[in-house]
Amino acid sequence: MNFAKLKEIQERLRKGVIIGEFDGKIELVAGMDCAFEGEMIFGAVTVMRFSELEKKSDILLIDGQGTLHPRNFGIACHLGVILGKASIGCAKKRLCGEFCDPGIEKGDRSPVFLKGIIQGYSLRTKNRVKPLFVSPGNLFTPDQACEVVLKMAKFRLPEPLRHADRFSKECKNILAGNKDYPENTTR
């Protein structure tokens, strides 16, 4: 994975090159992430120059739902199909479906059923931590999506999402004018 491009975007955000005015008043509706976040993600892809993304990324790992969505087509599906990339949804919270808690060890998983069909898994990525909800977005099966997420997880969140999550919190604090926010915090 290439974090140099992420650092470039981070610097541009700090300088205000990418962000316009933002009043902080956004109302989000559960299950409708793509309506708001999709536009920002496509904007970020444009900033990263799509040709570079095309050459360097094999998989899109999205902090959101794939097929484990009320309409069986979450933001990971949208982005994977539109960008023509394999994609996986990896969410911190369950949006829908029925499941039993997986065991407490890393790698334990429990299927999440939606309308009687396995759409994803509740997956433990670290011993004794809350599970993640993993589902395919595009070109993966639920089992394959779990295997990929497990290979990327040193902590609860897979490394690309952990770095992106930390970066988004930094951006949020920059937008809020919080100058005391430490840049080097980790989870």
Image: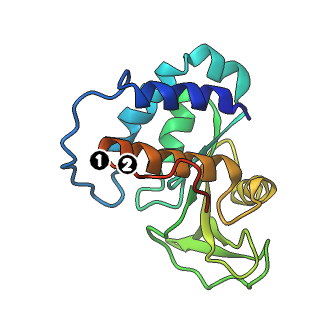
Given residues 47 and 144, the one toward you in this image is 47
- Quarter of the view holding residue 51: top right
The amino acid sitting under disc 1 is Ala
Q: Say what secondary structure mark 1 lies in.
A: loop
Check the picture and name the quadrant holding the N terminus: top right
The residue that appears at 33% across and 29% down in the rendered structure is: 19
x, y percent for residue 121 = 65, 68
Residue 109 sits above or below residue 58 on the image: below
Check the picture and name the quadrant holding the C terminus: bottom right
Q: Residues within 10 Å of mark 2 (few under 14, many from 20)?
A: some
User: Would residue 105 be found to the left or right of residue 93 on screen?
Assistant: right
Q: Identify the colour scheme used.
A: rainbow
The residue that appears at 48% across and 20% down in the rendered structure is: 47
- Let me know if residue 74 appears in the view: no
Given residues 75 and 168, the one toward you in this image is 168
The residue that appears at 62% across and 26% down in the rendered structure is: 5
Residue for badge 1: 176
The amino acid sitting under disc 2 is Asn
Given residues 173 and 2, the one toward you in this image is 173
Given residues 141 and 9, the one toward you in this image is 9
Q: Residues within 10 Å of mark 1 (few under 14, many from 20)?
A: few
Does the residue at mark 2 contact the one at mark 1 (Cβ under 8 Å)?
A: yes
x, y percent for residue 22 = 23, 37
Residue for badge 2: 173
The residue that appears at 37% across and 46% down in the rendered structure is: 179
